[in-house]
Image (spheres, rainbow, N blue to C red):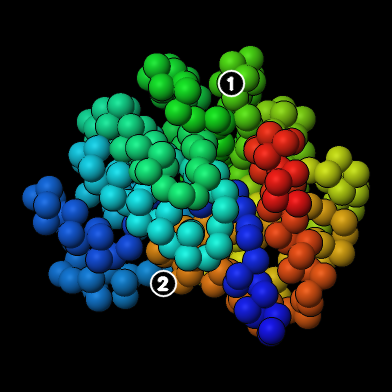
Amino acid sequence: TSLRSIVQNMPKAELHIHIEGSLEPELIFALAERNGVSLPYASVEALRAAYAFKDLQSFLDIYYAGASVLLQEQDFYDMTAAYLRRAEADHVRHTEIFFDPQTHTARGVPMATVINGIHRACQDSPVSATLILCFLRHLSEDDAIATLEAALPYRDKFIGVGLDSSEVGNPPEKFARVFSRCKDLGLRLVAHAGEEGPPAYIYAALDVLHVERIDHGVRCLEDHALTRRLAEEGMPLTVCPLSNIKLCVFRDMKQHNLLQLLDAGLVATVNSDDPAYFGGYLNENLLAAFDSLPLGLQHAYQLARNSFVASFLSEADKQKHL
Ligand code: ADE
Ligand code: ZN
């Protein structure tokens, strides 16, 4: 059996997937039609042709436009169900799904519509799936606090909170109070840091927000003390190879630092981020990395193992997968 087929077939967890980033152009057009929303693109092909990004912000502008077709609970259900079918095909046994409620509540969609639609699809899937509510860091902390309050009636339907959107200029410190409140509520904590932002943002995510995982974190290698600390603490990084190439964090996959992260002893995992926009779901991210980097069988096992170790499954449930 080839290394590629082992990578594809091995049971794995996914820990960094924005559900709005799984919205394929075909579904965007179908939902636009169903909801009478007009799109600034003439066709599926024209929309896909716009997926040429130079940085994170150029992607986010199109990603928020795509999400504008989501209005009814069934829309959120259909989007999530489609992702979970793809995850199942990639032998994903457990997934921790990000969602961005502010992208929808700002358009007048009720919090209940967003959370109930996504959650019901998770319950209907054979894949174990939990939800992480992300705050948009380009908005104010007061907006994040209001979003948390609006979501608390559905506290049983999400396990944690994260921080995403435009990183540079919106450091973790901006969200110190809301993360402190979430910690008190017993929510699990993660944040995007060190994707485009400097190592200082990773330090702040750890020391100010008290996160339990760093999303991306690939720029940690610029700081040796930070890299050592992340390794010693077993602090997981949810790395997204195709995303990093499409958003020009690395010039091409041969330049990606995934192997250096693993060699530094970090609990690095591979994830898809926004698979509909970046050219592939989880197995395509793994295969792209394995095709371009000198990764072997041991790395495949390590990445599969790391994905469960880094998850928010109970210790007993992790053991079943290790
Ligand atoms: N939202 C969706 N994908 C993101 C990413 N890669 N970084 C920050 N915010 C995001
Ligand atoms: Zn992300």
Q: Which residue is drawn at 79% across and 69% down?
A: 299
Three-letter code for the amino acid on which mark 2 is drawn: Ala
Q: How far apart are marks 1 and 2 (CA)?
A: 36 Å
Front residue of 235/39: it is: 235
Three-letter code for the amino acid on which mark 1 is drawn: Cys
Please provide percent x and percent y for residue 140.
46, 28
For label 2, the SS is loop
Is residue 228 rendered to the left or right of residue 103?
A: right
Please provide percent x and percent y for residue 169.
57, 42
Give above or below for 26 relative to 215.
below
For label 1, the SS is helix
Q: Residue at x 76, y 65 (%)?
A: 301
Is residue 272 rendered to the left or right of residue 39?
A: right
Which mark is nearer the camera, 1 or 2?
Answer: 1
Kindly tell me whether mark 2's CB lies below 8 Å from ligand 1.
Answer: no
Residue bearing the label numbered 2: 52
Please provide percent x and percent y for residue 214.
68, 44
Please provide percent x and percent y for residue 135.
49, 34
* Residue 307 visible in rendering: yes
Q: Which residue is drawn at 23% across and 71% down?
A: 44
Q: Residue at x 52, y 56 (%)?
A: 273
Q: How crowded is mark 2: few (under 14 residues within 10 Å), some or many (20 or more)?
A: few
State the image quarter where residue 28 is shown: bottom left
Is residue 197 rendered to the left or right of residue 226?
A: left
Which mark is drawn over residue 182?
1
Q: Residues within 10 Å of mark 1 (few under 14, many from 20)?
A: some
Q: Which residue lies furthest to the left in this view?
A: 36
Is residue 18 rendered to the left or right of residue 321?
A: left
Front residue of 194/230: it is: 230
